[in-house]
Image (tube, rainbow, N blue to C red):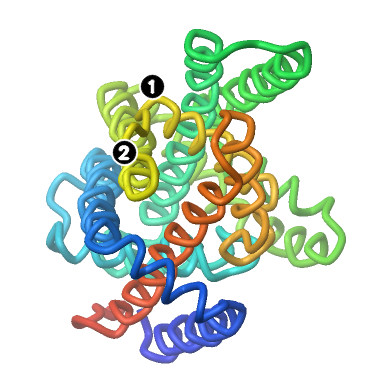
Amino acid sequence: MKKKYQNAFFIFGLVLLALMITQLDFKQVWEGLQHAGYWFVAVLVLWFFLYFFNTTAWYIIIRSTSPKPKFSYMWLYKVMVSGFALNYATPGGLMGGEPYRIMELSPYIGTEKASSSVILHTMTHIFSHFWFWLISVVLFIITEPLTPLMIGLLTAVTAFCILGIWFFMKGYQKGLANRAFALLSHIPGAKKWARRFIDNHHDELDNIDHQIAALHKQNPHTFWGALTLELSCRFLSAFEIFFILLVIMPSANYFQCVLILAFTSLFANLLFFMPLQIGGREGGFMMSASGLALTTSAGIFVALIVRLRELFWTALGLLLIKVGKTKRHV
């Protein structure tokens, strides 16, 4: 990646991070950290390991088309963490981290392969969320009492997840690059840029879709391996909420933490256009906590610690953009 682009990503991310930090109540932050104690460190360390799941899923996708990539696994881990940091900080999420990952990887395996691997990993990452939410519906039915309101809500979530799974399965079979830009071409504010991009890069988009479809058909082990890693990451990340709740509720239940994470992530992703899902994530925590008979204060405490963890890893990810040498296009 050219130095000027790297600096642009870095500065843009820092500006947004600084803006988000100014929204914090520092007195509440300090009290929350004192209350969490060493469990906050455990949460930070947990995500150090969770990012390995995401990186490994991306790595096996890359290896399926480029068997001997000329970069190290830890370099890819660094790029993954920085990409997530940009996604956390950027309104619209994928507008930041995905272009950065493509630009970093392109000098090693080419723009088309880099684009298809990033798109395919992002598809798998999102696809795993739909499966996570659908499995969580079943878990809720098994473990929690049902009311008419919850039955209606769970029915709506189930329909939404099935629709999402169907959409992505079609995307895996036929590719998603052209479909994504076709969708953008109907969105006000992006339609002119998207249509111009389609006209100028029609062949490249076709090649990317061909690679995505070919990987799904010819390398099913890669597809299912990447999906399993991403889905496992969803369930393991529920330990973050479990660790936090142990501070105030020694009898915390891991399965309830899975449900809190599922409904919170669903609510937050519906507000994807907000940087760090400000407000949406907190509202999701409080709604899911109250729905599972937990106190509102518990939901607020969990939301605060998760927010601080996200800010920590966002800051670290942005700093990692400037760490290590970046290969330039020859």
Where residue 257 sits: x, y (%)? 42, 34
Up-down relation of residue 128 to residue 147 (above or below): below
Q: Quadrant of residue 155?
A: top right
Task: Measuring from the top left, give residue 8's x and y in whole percent.
Answer: 49, 87
Q: In this view, does 62 lie to the left or right of 318?
A: left
N-terminal-most mark, 1 or 2: 1
Query: Which of 267/121 is in front?
Result: 267
Residue 161's image quarter?
Answer: top right
Residue 217's tag is 1
Q: Residue at coordinates 37% horizontally, 56% vertically from top-left?
A: 114
**Dot 2 lies on which element?**
loop
The CA distance from mark 1 to mark 2 is 47 Å
Q: Compared with residue 214, is residue 144 higher up or lower down, i.e. above or below?
A: above
Q: In which quarter of the image is residue 94?
A: bottom right
Task: Report the mark closest to the observer, 1 or 2.
Answer: 2
Along the line of sight, which residue is nearer the eye, 169 or 289?
289
Q: Residue at x 23, y 82 (%)?
A: 323
Mark sitting on residue 72 = none
Q: Which residue is drawn at 35% across and 78% down?
A: 1
Q: Which residue is drawn at 62% across and 18% down?
A: 162
Crowd band around label 1 with a 10 angstrom C-alpha radius: few (<14), some (14–19), many (20+): few
Callout 1, which amino acid? Lys
Q: Residue 274, percent across and down? A: 67, 63
Which amino acid type is shown beneath numbered disc 2?
Pro
Q: Can residue 172 be seen in this view?
A: yes
Give the class, few, some or many, for how many residues have Cα within 10 Å of label 2's Cα (few <14, many ≥20): few
At which x and y percent is residue 16? 56, 80
Which residue in the structure is indicated by mark 2? 250
| Residue farthest along the top direction in this orientation | 142
